[in-house]
Amino acid sequence: MTDDIRLAFAHPSERAEASSQTPCDRISLRDYTVEVEIGAFQQERGTLQRVRFNVVVEVLPLTGPIEDDVDRILSYDKVTEAIGIELEAERLNLLETLAARVAERILLEPQAERVFVRIEKLDRGPFALGVEIVRSRDGVDLAGQDHVEAPHPRIVYLPHDAVAAPYLTGWLDQLIDMDAPLIICVDAGDVTPPQAGHALAQRRIDLLAIEQNAWCLAARDRRAKVVGTRTELDWAMKNGQTCIWAPSKIVLDAVDGPSASPGDTAALVAWFAAEMEAKELLVIGGDAPDATVPVRRIDITTETI
């Protein structure tokens, strides 16, 4: 029992060695510390905290001489790259989610057989809070993870005048029949949101005002569903579901978030279109924003898109 307890808190390299069933080589990354915004508590938003990574990757022994050739081994850079990619992808609430994503990305490397990932928060008190996971190649579905082509949706921005227009149902009929998945974006409507006098609080209030209007539109046309996460958006696009974007989670969780305020909805939608690698940003009735994707504008009095 004493040895079991010691191993529970030992470095992942010792855990790997104690649990290994087959001869293998190991590479390790020790005490790799970065500053990142992560956490489910409100006090952890808008604040960087130190997070420490310890990673051990088991690889099958090479056959034949290494010949001092870096292309024949699993480079340490692949481990730090996996951490960097997942930290930059989106803001996360849970260390468990981050650990699982890092492990799965490392296991995309053909040499990797099993990976131990320990992640600890260092600034939540005079201690370290963390998680440790183990993942193996035969326990993770890796098929096609690095080759899946994401859909390129058509993003349609409907300012409140367009939402109230008599052609709305006809526009949606035409848009749903077009050649790309459809994601609809709206503004906050013609109601002024409450004013909080605090920037972070106001940002949330303004985003929630947009979401309220999204739900109003969804009530008018049941073909469109309000969606707020990238995972659900990806599923919906692949399965032919029309979405209305609820922006709070994606905006607040973005590592490199939009510079536009929620009050400048057109610029916010342009940022979202770029994030989604949209086929087109179609603006009905409002001013066309600057965007990195193709933009098309039609007048609110136009019946045919």
Image (cartoon, helix red, strand yellow):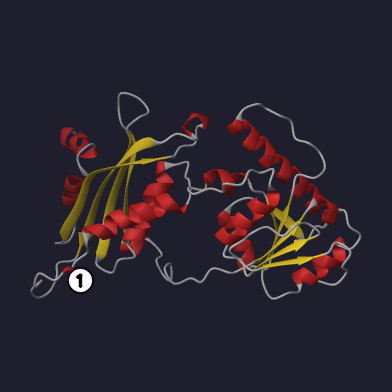
Residue at image x 61%, y 28%?
198
Residue at image x 82%, y 57%?
221
Q: In the picture, residue 279 is in which quadrant?
A: bottom right
Q: Is any part of residue 227 visible from this angle?
A: no
Question: Judging from the image, what secondary structure is the residue with disc 1 in?
Answer: helix
Does 22 sit above or below residue 116? below
Q: Which residue carries the number 1 mark? A: 71
Residue 112: x, y in percent? 26, 63
Pick out the residue farthest to the right. 166
Q: In the picture, residue 184 is in which quadrant?
A: bottom right
Q: Nearer the viewer, residue 207 or 12?
A: 207
Q: Is residue 32 left or right of residue 282?
A: left
The amino acid sitting under disc 1 is: Asp
All told, the count of numbered labels is 1
Residue at image x 81%, y 50%?
160
Q: Which of 23 and 124 is in front in this view?
A: 124
Pick out the residue farthest to the top. 126
Residue 110: x, y in percent? 28, 69
